[in-house]
Image (spheres, rainbow, N blue to C red):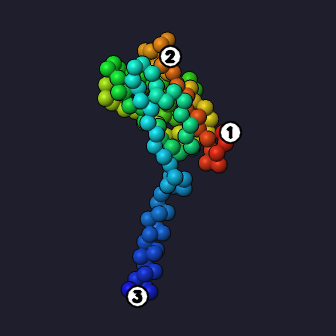
Amino acid sequence: MSIKKSVNISLAFLMLFSLFPAGQANAAEHKVSMKDWLFNPKVLTVKVGDTVTWVNDDDTMHNIYFEDKFPGAPQIDEPEKIRLRKKFSLTFEKAGEYDYFCRNHQDYDMVGKIIVKSKQGGTP
């Protein structure tokens, strides 16, 4: 292969990787199961940029709302309904602790928490 062709291929790869935002390459996906009127795991620790997907593995409809407001987070007045065998995903862009609930079953302890750590490992 000629040097010119090798340089062109290298530049093409550099241009391709520059299209992706920094930090996205290390983003992970996590699953929270909704079964037996519980979130499992109940507490999940992730990093900034990670995505959490709630999957309804139960025999009834559930929903999710968050105590705090942040982009994409369903609130108590408009919870995200998750029907049987359906899912809902949310990417966490800021470190912190996020409490969430199933509005229909929170009295039965269907509550959870996402702890989001910065890329360096600590919370704010």
Q: Mark 1 and mark 2: span between their CA atoms?
A: 28 Å
Residue 114 visible to an observer of this rendering = yes
Q: Residues within 10 Å of mark 2 (few under 14, many from 20)?
A: few
Occupied quadrant, residue 115? top right
Residue at (45, 75) in percent of width and height: 10
Q: Name the residue nearer the viewer: 36 or 23.
A: 36
Local crowd at mark 1 within 10 Å, few (<14), some, or many (≥20)?
few
CA distance separating discs 1 and 3: 50 Å
Residue found at x 46% / y 28% = 40
Binning the other alpha carbons within 10 Å of mark 3 as few (below 14), some (14 to 19) or many (20 upward) gives few
Tell me the CA gap for discs 2 and 3: 65 Å
Residue bearing the label numbered 2: 109
Q: Which residue occupies 35% across, 23% down?
A: 58
Mark 1 or mark 3, which has the lower sequence index? 3
- Which residue is labeled 3 in the image? 2
83 versus 22 height, above or below: above
Quarter of the figure that contains the C terminus:
top right
Residue type pointed to by label 1: Pro
Q: Do callouts 1 and 3 mark residues in contact (Cβ within 8 Å)?
A: no
- Which-is-in-front pick, marks 1 and 2? 2
Q: Which mark is on residue 124?
A: 1
Amino acid identity at mark 2: Asp
Whether residue 81 appears in this view of the structure is: no
